Structure formats: structure tokens, C-alpha cells
Image (tube, rainbow, N blue to C red):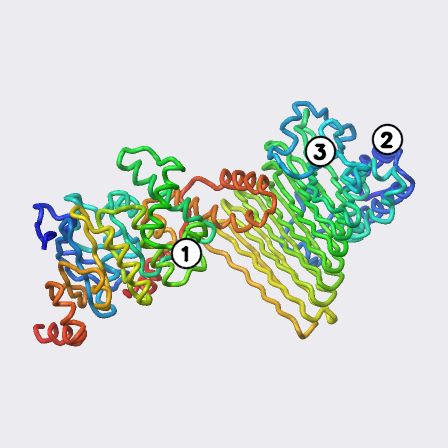
Amino acid sequence: MATETKKSTPLLSIKGLTASAGDLKILKGIDLDIYPGEVHAIMGPNGSGKSTLTNVLAGRPDYTVTGGEVLFEGQSILGLEPEIRARMGLFLAFQYPLELPGVRAWQFLKAGVDAKRLHNGQEEMSAREFDQMLKAKVAEVQIDPELVRRAVNEGFSGGEKKRNEVLQMAVLDPKLALLDETDSGLDIDALRIVSDGVNLLRSPDKAVVLVTHYQRILNYISPNHVHVLYDGRIVRSGGPELAHELEEKGYDWIKDLVDATV
Amino acid sequence: MTTAPAKYAHYLADFQSLTEGPGAEAPAWLKSARDNAWTKFAATGFPTARRGNERWKYTNVGPIARTDFGYPLAPAPADGSEGLVPSYQVSGQTVFDLIYVDGVYSPGLSSPALDASGVVAASLAVAAGNDSLDLEGQVGRYAPPDDDGFAALNTAFLRDGAYVNVADDHAEKVVIRISYITSQSEDANHKVTYPRTMIVAGRNTDITVVESYRGPQESVYFTNAVTEISVREGAKLDHYRLLLEGGKAFHVGTSRVIQEKDSSFSSASFALGTTLARNDLEVLLDAPGAYCSLNGLYLTADNQHIDNLISIDHAKPNCTSRLNYKGILDGKSRAVFGGTVMVRRDAQKSDAEQTDKNLILSNSAEVDSKPSLLIYADDVKCSHGATAGHIDADTLFYLRSRGLDLDTASRMLVHAFASEIINTVNLEPLQDYLNTLFAAAIPNKALPIAGLVPSRRAKAAGDK
């Protein structure tokens, strides 16, 4: 695969990451390198720590990092506020996108784009330029333009919310996109549209981490690497064939495998 | 003949100065209404919570009763007057402006309508002298001086105000802006004004009235306002009340609304500043098919206190009411919300919803919210609810994850909370004006966030 050509520095490097929520230890030592151009799928049963991993990477304050290190383009990010990580080019597509009544999508997205531009030493985008860019992205990710005129996610269906996450991702144009079960609750058409949106982002200098419970989305977004997370650790890594194996054998296979080695 | 307890001696002196001075020219019926109201006030005085008075349970008007507010007999010169007219421009609609400085109508600043093809929007003093308008039967009809001491005092000092009457079947939409302004005192005197507004929306008319109250930021003054509104059959009235008083001001507003068959009354009340504000609004749905939507937005800080007492009376069947008030509280401020929806025995098929939501920006602000439903009919659809809380931590994280810093994200969420009410305003320039006002009033500071308690978080967070 062309994208296998690895540069020397990973885009994201996770070393020995442990994290808790309150007294509950969730991540028990994660090691993972993600190189530009790659798509990684992280699979695992419920409660294995998949969502925690993406949320910790994005800087959600609900979790406490208890050990380890995360480097984004060589820079340690665990001490940085979530907004700084976002401006550096990290994006989290939420498993449960929130409704923001009274916040118009236009205003919300422009604030995000401008914050990133200012961070990078650029000027804020003019309203007109942003307008054109937004229109283009709306067309690109095939979202109903009406949704952009409304308050963010307010009264949206589950599928619309997920598609709106993909639009936000396209507009903010991150270097690393973390998709937290973006495929859950989508019908087959929505899944295809969401997948197309993600595939648009694929480029030699960007990377995607897909967190998913099911193999289904991997039919549309083919990963370079598949990891299985169980009880806060990556217990198995492989190529796309690992996803198929999981699909066939189920998560009990992993559980048995791990429990046998303990 | 006119007497009062010693503690109201200065009100009595002012009352006598008014009735013997500029008020002496009023028609006989108005003079007698004033005398009658004074007698009521002298007997009842200002309300107190002590007598088991539910209507004033959470609001102490002691500071008003204790301050010697003086009635300005001569109006302040309306100099530098440009700042006194509303700053937002309304285009494409006929607009009449009525401007009052220290309670007295300012002809120079106003653009009234006295005989303009069915629209009267004029000084109440002028209208009172015009027999064909028959104000005698209207003044005090819906807000009688018996209601409470404040309404009585307002009527006792009734000298001028605004009179709006749009004739039945008047087809053109009109906008009337009524601005009551207290001017900066030259001396240390604390002024009191008694704005009086009467609005009659004739049959099948469509009108918008904006009532605003403003005053100097640093002066202690008192506005005691009464508004009486009649919405006739099939009429549509959009009514906005802007309380933009100074930070040391006291404001007591009493509004009474009566609605006829198939009429629509959409109101929004906005309050910023004001050390003590009371917004007492009663709507009587007096005929089938009437609809009212009462919205409110208040933003308080420091030691400010706001009391919204809203009551809707479903007296007849098939009426619909929506009551939605929202508060944003900072500092040690306190908000009181008393919402009562009464559905009478005959009022079958009533449809009523009321909510009061509060966003608390500090750890020492306080809300007393008491929504209540009194239902005596059996075939009705009614709901109520009240909430109070900080900015939601998950929502805040969502915004921050898109690159917005904590302050920007917080302010965006506070403004979004307010915008639900601001968006009910049907007059775009006013909507823009309010958006700017409220955006500027949102405090610039770190806000407390709901859900950021470690033990609770652990439970809520549990990995998905």
C-alpha cells in the first residue's frame, strides 16, 4: 500500500498512557504510533476504554491522566487545553454530539476556524470567504444545507448529528481525526455518506483513528491497521484481516485469548 | 381632606404640589381618580411580606419605602436629547415615537399620531382632554388602585403617559415606541416617576408596541409604572417591555392585559441592570380562541433583585397560553419567579405551558422559582417546569474541542441561552439591538460549570 511509506516521526505517538475517571482505572497502558497517511481502527467490546482513549486524547476534563505520554507532531499535548489541541489539528467526532440550541452552525464553525487560523498566525477569515468555504464543504460531505442554517444539532436525528460531525471535521480540516463510534446508529445510506466524508479527509499528511464496535464501517473506510482494545489495553494489532476475524469469532474470542494468557 | 401616615408625608407633599400645580388643569374625572387613588395608597401604603402577602413574599420593598423619592414637578430640559430616542431604526413600517423625560411628554422628541386615519398614539394628558377618546372609562379599568399600593400611587400621580388606540379594522401594521426616561439629577434628589401606558388594539388590528424604561447609571431613582392593555377581537398585539434602568434604580411595573375572542398577545420582557425590579403581569383570556405568549429574559448581577410575577387567567374555553421566562444570574443577585396559570371551570380545551429556566453564573446567586397551575376544568392540556443550573460541562467541552477557548465558549453558550427569548421578537432591528445589549452584558469571567465534581463525574463518565 502506498500509504505504508512511513515518515520517521509519527503524527501521534502514545506511550504507556494510563487514565482514570474518578477512582475507576480505565486505560491501563496504551502504546500506539500513528503515522501520516494512515487509518487506524480501534475495536473492542463495550467498556474496553475505546471512548476514553479518544476523549483523553482530545482533552476531555472528565478524565485524569495518571501516567504516560502523548506526542502530537513531536509535541507533548497532555498538559494542553482541549481548544489548543483542536487548533493544532486534532479533531474528535463525538459519539453523542451535543445539541446547541441558540448557537448557529455558521457562527460556531467560523469561531472554530478563526481560532485555528489565529493560532497558526493567520488572520480571521472574512465572512464571505467563510461562506464560500462552508458551502463547498456542505456540498462535499452531502449534508442538507438547511441543517447548517439551524442551531447546531438542535432537533437533529441521530444520523444527522453524525453527518454534522463529519461536516465540522471537513470545515476544520484536522491533521488527525478521532471518530468515536461515528458509525453507530447509522443506516446504510448514512453510513456511506459519513464514510465518503472521512475518505475525503484521507491524504498522505493526515491520519484517521476510527473507534468502532462493528466491522461494518471498515467496508467503506479501509484501515491500514486494526487494534483490539480490551480492559484498557491494546491486546492485538494487525491488518484489515483482524477486523474480519473479529467479526467471525466475536469479542468473546478476544476475552478468552486474553484471559488465557493472564 | 388629603391625609397620610407620617412616613408618607413627603409623598403627600408631592401629591398636593401636583394637584394644586400642574395637575390642576386635568379633567374632573381624572382629578377624582387621583384623589381616590391617594386615599387608597394612604390607607394601604407599600406592600410588605409580613402580612402573609404571597404576592410579595420574596421581595422586600423596604428600600423603596425608606428612600425619600421626590416627584419632579418641572420636567428636565430635554437637552442632548438625541440619546433619548431609541437608537435602533425601524424601516418599512409606520413608526410613532412617544418620548417622556421625568414622566412628562416631550413633544419635541416625539412623533405622535392623534388623528392619523384611525391611529392614536399620543400623550395621555392630551388624550385625557379629548372627550371623544373617552379615557374616563378606560383609566384604571384593568389596573385599579385597589390592586396594591404601587398601582394606587401611580394613579394618584397620574399626570401624563402614553395613550395608544388603533381603531377597529385598521389594516396597516403600526409600530409604536414609548420611551420613559429618567434624567440625570442636577442635585442629590432621588426622583420618582409614574409612567402610565394605555393600549387599545382595535378589532382585527396588527400592532407592535415597545415600552422602554431607561435612566442614568449612577443615580438612585424609582420608576413606578402601570400599563393597561386591551386586545380586541381578532387583534394581534406584539408587546415588548425593555427594562434598561440604571444600576441603582428601582422599578415596579404593573401590567394588566385583557384579551377578547381570537386575539393574540405576544409579549417579551427584557431586563438588565436595576437594583430592584418587579414585573407584575396579569393576562386575562376573556373569550374563546385567545392566545398569549409571554416571554421574559433577565440578566442580573451584583446585589440586584428581580421579581417576575406573572399570572394568566384562562377564563374561557379554547384559549392557549405560553409562558417562558429565562434568567441569567451573576454575583449575589437574586431572581424570583412566580408564575400562575389559572384554568377556570368553564375553560375546557385550555392549552397552557409555562417554564422558567435560570442559568447561574456565580456560586452566590439565587433563584426562587414557583410555577403553579390552578386547574378547575377537566379537559385541558397544561404543563409547567422550572430549572436552574450552571453551564453544562459536556456542552462546554464540545465547543472547546472545536477550538473555542473557555471564555468564548462560555459566552457563546450564555448568549445562546438568551437568544431563545430574543428570537421571539418580531421586529428585526429591535432583535439586533437586544442581541447587542445582552451580548455586551454577559460578564467576562470564568464561569462555574455544572458537572465538574470528581465523584459525580466518575459515575457519569463510565466508558461507553
Relative height, residue A102 to residue A180 (above, below): above
Residue ID for mark 1: A153
Nearer to us of marks 1 and 2 is 1
Left/right placement of residue B112 relative to residue A7 reads: right
- Quadrant occupied by the N terminus of chain B: top right
Instruction: Indicate which label's residue lies in the foreground, 1 or 3.
Output: 1
Residue type, mark 1 in image: Asn
Rendering quarter of residue A226: bottom left
Dot 1 falls on a residue whose secondary structure is loop
Position of B181 compared to B440: left or right? Answer: right
Q: Is residue B305 above or below residue B193?
A: below
- Tell me which numbered mark, 2 or 3, is placed earlier along the sequence: 2
Both labels 2 and 3 in a single chain: yes
Question: How crowded is the residue under tag 1: few (<14 C-alpha within 10 Å), some, or many (20+)?
Answer: many
Tag 3: residue type? Ile
Disc 1/disc 2 C-alpha distance (Å): 62 Å
Looking at the image, residue B441 lies above or below residue B326: above
Query: Is residue B49 in view?
Result: no
Report in which chain the residue with disc 2 lies. Answer: B
**Res. B14 visible in picture:** yes
Q: Label 2 amino acid? A: Gly
> In percent of the image, x 25 and y 52: which residue is there?
A200
